[in-house]
Image: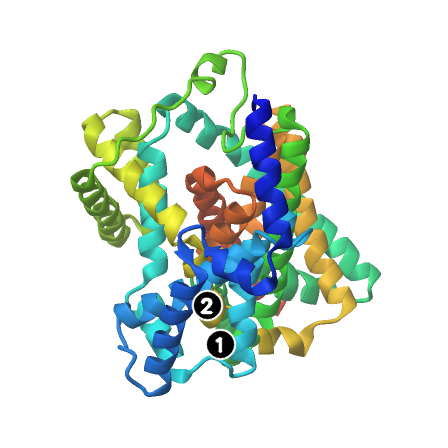
Amino acid sequence: MLTSKEMKSVTKNTMIDENLNVFQKLLKWEIGGVISFPVYVILAIIIFLAAYFHQLPNNMLGGFAVIIIIGMLLGDIGQKIPILKNIGGPAILSLFVPSLLVFYEVINPAALAASETLMKTANFLYFYIAALVVGSILGMNRIVLVQGFIRMFIPLIAGTFAAISAGLLVGVLFGRSVYETFFFIIVPIIAGGIGEGILPLSIGYAGTLNVANEQLVSQLIPAAVIGNICAVIAAGLLKSLGEKKPELTGNGRLVKSNKDDAIFNQKEAPLKIDLKLIGAGVLLACSFFVVGGLLEKFVHIPGPILMIILATLVKYMMLLPGKLESGAQQFYKLMSSSFTYPLMVGLGMLYIPLDDVVKVIDLSYVLICATVVISMFSAGWFVGKLMKMFPVDAAIVTGCHSGLGGTGDVAILSASNRMELMPFAQISTRLGGAATVIIATILLRFFN
C-alpha cells in the first residue's frame, strides 16, 4: 500500500509525463524496456547503412542484427496499442509487418539474405525450440509434466474431429466441395506448419495428382497462414479472458486436480543466474535435439518428437543433477524473454508469403479457416474442462494444432503469454501434424 507521500510523488510524475511533448517522450522511451530511443536509432541507422552499402555480414551476426533491431521495436509497439495488445499485438506485428515489408520489397536484399542465412541455413528456429522444449521440460514438476502429456491427447483428438466436421459443414454451406474444403483448406491448417506439414503434404499430393509439388505449395500455404492468424488472435483473447476470470486458467499449468493442488500452489524459488550453468543448458538443448535426430534414423519418428519424449523420460526418471536442470531452465528463460519477437520477425520475412494469401483470399475461405480454428480451440476448452484441466490452457494447447508448426507454437504461446506450455504445444503440433499428413495423403488416393 502506498503512503500519502508516495501517492503524491506518483501523481506528480504522471503529470510530468503527460506534459512532455512528443520529442521529450521519444527521448524517454526505452525500446523493450532496456534500450533508450536515441541509442536504438543510432544502432538501427548503422545496420541500415551496412545493408544499403552491402557491408552487412551474410551470416548469423548480420541476421541477428536485422531481426533483433526490428523485433524489439515491433514487440514494444505491439504491447502499447490498445485492443491489439489484448489479442497478441506483439506477436501479430512481429510476424506480419516484416511479411508486408517483404511483400512490398521494402526490406533491403542484403538484410533479407542475412536473415535467411540465420533462419534457414543456421536453422535458428530449431535452436530456439530446442531451448524452450528442453528447458521447460527439465524445469517442470515431473508429476505435473506426465499428467499433462497423458491428458492432452484426448482434447487433441476431439479438437481435430471438431475442426474437420465444422470446417466441412461451413465449406458445403458456401458451395465448396467436400474434396476442396478438406484437402486444400482444412488439412493445411492442421498439417503442422510449412516445413513439417505443407512441404511433405505437397509431395504426397503431387505423387497422386501428377502435378508439380511447387504448384501445390502455393495452394496449401494460404489456409495455413490465415489459420495461424486466427489462432494467434484466439490465444490473445483467451489470455484476456483468463485475466478477467482467474478460475479458468492455470497461467501455464495444464492439469487441475485436488490431489495436485499442493504441488501447483508451490511458488518456484527464484532462479539464481549462473552463466556457466547457462552454457551447460545450451549444450543440453543441442544434445537432446541431436539425439532425437539420430534416433529418427532408426525408429522413423520425427526427431523433435523424440527430443520431447527423451527430455520427459530424463526428467521423470531424475537422470540429471538438479543444477544441470537449472541450467537448461535458465537458458530457456533467456531465449523466451530476449529472442521471441526477433525470431518471429525472421519467420514473418521468410515463411509467411502474403502474395500467396492474396491470390485465394475471399470471405468464404476466411470463414472456413476461422471455423476450423475456433472449433479446435472450443473442443480443447470443453473436453479439457471435463478432464479437470484448466480450460483456457487446454484450449490454447489444443489450438496449437491449427498453427504454423514451430512458427505457430511460438506465436500462439507468445500471444497468450504461456511459453511454459511449449512441450505440450509441440506434441499437439508435431504428432497431430504428422498424423494429419499421413492420413490425408492416403485418403487422397481414394478420391482420385
Q: Is residue 404 visible?
A: no
Q: Amino acid at mark 2?
A: Leu
For this orientation, the residue located farthest to the left is: 276
Q: Amino acid at mark 1?
A: Asn
The quadrant in which residue 42 appears is: bottom left
Q: Is residue 340 visible?
A: yes
Residue ID at (35%, 24%)? 142
Does residue 108 lie above or below 145 as drawn? below
Q: Which residue is tagged 2? A: 199
The quadrant in which residue 144 appears is: top left
Residue 348: percent from left, percent from top: 49, 67
**Apparent side of residue 153 relative to residue 309 in the rendered image (left or right):** right
**Residue sitting nearer the eye, 164 or 127:** 127
Q: Secondary structure at mark 2?
A: helix
Q: Which mark is residue 213?
A: 1
Residue ID at (39%, 21%)? 143
**Neighbour tally class for label 1: few under 14, some 14-19, many 20 plus, Cα within 10 Å:** many
Residue 69: percent from left, percent from top: 40, 65
Q: Secondary structure at mark 1?
A: helix
The N terminus sits in image quarter: top right
Q: How is the image coloured?
A: rainbow
**Residue sitting nearer the eye, 186 or 410:** 410
**Residue sitting nearer the eye, 258 or 47:** 47
Q: Marks 1 and 2: CB-CB under 8 Å?
A: yes
Residue ID at (40%, 77%)? 112
**Residue sitting nearer the eye, 364 or 111:** 111
Residue 242: percent from left, percent from top: 63, 33
Number of disc labels: 2
